[in-house]
Amino acid sequence: MSKKGETLLGGRKRQQLKNKLTSTDSELNMKNFFLTPGPSELYPTVEDHVRTALRTGIASISHRSSDFKKIFAEAKENLKLLLDLPDGFDVVFLGSANEIWERSLQNLVEKQSAHFVNGAFSEGYAKFAKQLRKKTFIVKTQEGNGFELSEGEIPEDCEFIALTANETSTGVMLPSANLSVIRRRFPNAIVSVDAVSILPCYETDFTVADTIFFSVQKAFGLPAGLGVWIFNEKCLQKAEKMQAEGHQIGTFHALPELAKRAKDHQTPETPNVLAVYLLAKVAGDMLRYGKERMMREQTYKANLLYHTLEKSSFLTPLVKNEKFRSPTVVVAECERAKDFIEKFAALHHVRVGSGYGNYKDKHIRIANFPAASKERIEMFCDCIEGFEF
Ligand SMILES: *Cc1c(COP(=O)(O)O)cnc(C)c1O
């Protein structure tokens, strides 16, 4: 996919590069390819879209103009197609996934929320609920483990269940098929799915998920600074009811206000127009590339990465149960993570992510997003196999 910077080199070329590195690093002032789990490598078409946007003045147009409304509509339409959103779901734009954690809790939870926690991001959502004084129920499992969703003591009448489709800190996926379990247990609850580091590479069960959200700097391969919140009628009704009953659900980014503006392809505030434009374009590019093809390649690349870790003498997959292994964020235990990351970047100009939080020097995290072509991942795996400390 990417034309520039094919910097993963094999055999003799690698040796030449090694020799060169020993003379002077600055001779090779090359940009790294970012296999980091967010921000990450940009999708290969972003550069051209940024140029077009600058040339045509996208960043200067009024957000009340018909030109902006067209961009908003295009972004929404392309996302609906790419994510297979059924009728009855709407899309609005906010600042980040952190913001959507907060807004979803403010707008959709009167008293109680339940959270399935298996790492730093699912924990973050639960922490926001506590800070907003909700009564929170937490079902916890060890980092590296996944959820069947049949476990955990949660009151039957719990209003809101928070799930994480892809726990980015540990590389654990929630299989979409498991969602139906939660619906059977809690027929009336609002089910919220944080899908930040896996959309668009996730087949969401929209008969269960009432709201799902992501930010764009992960699997979409866009510059950070935009959160996308998808919700159904049930969410909107709940927020309206809470508002009518006098609950504090926020101001400009309260869901009813966002939804009202979105009907007219508008945002309440002056939005990041460039970011919405880039999302519209890249979602369109992904549609043209083909969702099925993208998903097939995703699976192929993930299998290759896990296979490489299993063979490696210094890397071990953190997630043991294959069914919970994330296809987009691949995490490995590594005793010398810091050394590996630095040396690998110096040799191959590819930067992988360090472990999250306490695991900074114990894990590495590899972003296997659509921006990395299958040739890129194949070469990456070759270089892992040939790597020596
Ligand atoms: C990165 C991430 C977030 C936070 O995203 P921001 O855009 O930084 O707010 C939330 N949840 C998950 C699963 C993530 O990977």
Image: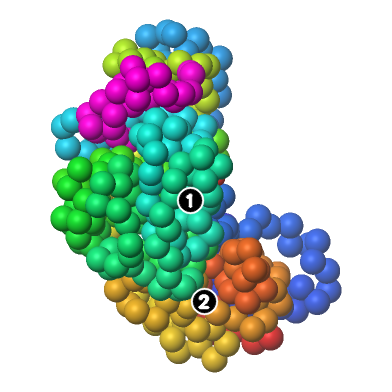
Q: Is residue 333 left or right of residue 182?
A: right
At 38% across and 34% down in the image, what residue appears?
A: 110
In the image, 136 versus 86, the foreground residue is: 136
Dot 1 alpha-carbon crowd within 10 angstroms: few under 14, some 14 to 19, many 20 or more: many
Going from N to C along the chain, the mark reached first, 2 or 1, is: 1
Could you classify mark 2 by the number of other residues whose Cα lies within 10 Å: few (under 14), some (14-19), or many (20 or more)? Answer: many
Identified at 56% across, 14% down, the residue is: 60
Total labels: the figure holds: 2
Q: x, y (%) of residue 111? A: 39, 39
The quarter of the picture where residue 84 lies is top left
- The verdict on residue 284 being magenta is no
Number of the label disc, if any, that sits on residue 106 = none
Cβ of mark 1 under 8 Å from ligand 1: the answer is no
Q: Taking 37 as reference, is 361 above or below it?
A: below
65 over 346 or under it: above or below: above
Viewer-nearest of discs 2 and 1: 1
Please indicate, yes or no, whether residue 225 appears anywhere in the rendered image. Answer: yes
Q: Position of residue 77 (x, y in %)?
A: 26, 30
**Segment colored magenta:** 230-256
Q: Position of residue 105 (x, y in %)?
A: 43, 38
Residue visible at 44% across and 32% down? 106
Tell me the element at label 2.
Answer: strand
SS for callout 1:
helix
Colour convention: rainbow
What's the mark number on residue 126?
1
Amino acid type shown at disc 1: Ala
Report if residue 200 is visible in the image.
no
Kindly report the distance in space between the C-alpha atoms of the residues bearing marks 2 and 1. 26 Å
Look at mark 2 in the image and give the residue it sits on: 332
